[in-house]
Amino acid sequence: MAAKGPIRGRFTALLLALVALMLTTPLVEKFAGIEWVALDLLFTALMLALLYAMSRERHFLLMAVFLALPAVGSRWGVRASGNDLFVVASFVVQIAFLGVSMVVVLLESFARSGSRWTRSSEASASTC
């Protein structure tokens, strides 16, 4: 069942998470020891922003949650495991989640029938 009306700021939150990840990555790489924690936190924030961006349609959200939970868990579990097979599985799950997210965001941004979007939301969706 779809949510009633547009959820404001969904794509703005996604845009902010993407910009934060892109801007802080070069800064964080200079600090030895904490770089992986900061980057993993920012990537987790990006995944949560993607979930929020896909929260309008319930079936998209459920599919994304089932992909996001292993993606986030494996992202943090790679640090503890160090197993090469686990690293590959983690990347596969993350790529699957990001791929599904990209398709859903494109569908949401180009299929605007029946919804009233603000101009800033349209700009944020097309920028993402």
Image (spheres, helix red, strand yellow):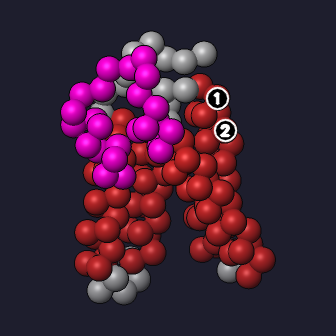
- The kind of residue tagged 2 is Met
Question: Which type of secondary structure does the marked residue at label 2 adopt?
Answer: helix
Q: Residues within 10 Å of mark 1 (few under 14, many from 20)?
A: few
Q: In this orientation, does residue 74 appear?
A: no
Does residue 39 lie above or below 112 as drawn? Answer: below
- Asked whether, in this view, residue 59 is left or right of residue 56, the answer is right
- Asked whether, in this view, residue 27 is left or right of residue 96, the answer is left
Going 29% across and 86% down the picture, which residue do you hit?
30
Magenta segment, which residues?
105-128
Residue 42 picture location, percent across and down: 39, 60
- The quarter in which the N terminus is drawn is top right
Magenta stretch encompasses residue 8: no
Front-most of residues 122 and 91: 122
Residue 10 picture location, percent across and down: 36, 35
As drawn, the label of residue 63 is 2
Does residue 89 lie above or below 110 as drawn? Answer: below
Q: CA distance from mark 1 to mark 2?
A: 6 Å
Query: Number of numbered discs present?
Result: 2
Residue 17 picture location, percent across and down: 34, 53
Question: Which type of secondary structure does the marked residue at label 1 adopt?
Answer: helix
- Asked whether, in this view, residue 96 is left or right of residue 84, the answer is left
Front-most of residues 28 and 26: 26
Label 1–label 2 contact, CB within 8 A: yes
As drawn, the label of residue 84 is none
Front-most of residues 19 and 41: 19
Q: Residues within 10 Å of mark 2 (few under 14, many from 20)?
A: some
Going 24% across and 28% down the picture, which residue do you hit?
118
- The kind of residue tagged 1 is His
Residue that label 1 marks: 59
Magenta stretch encompasses residue 119: yes
- Asked whether, in this view, residue 13 is left or right of residue 1, the answer is left
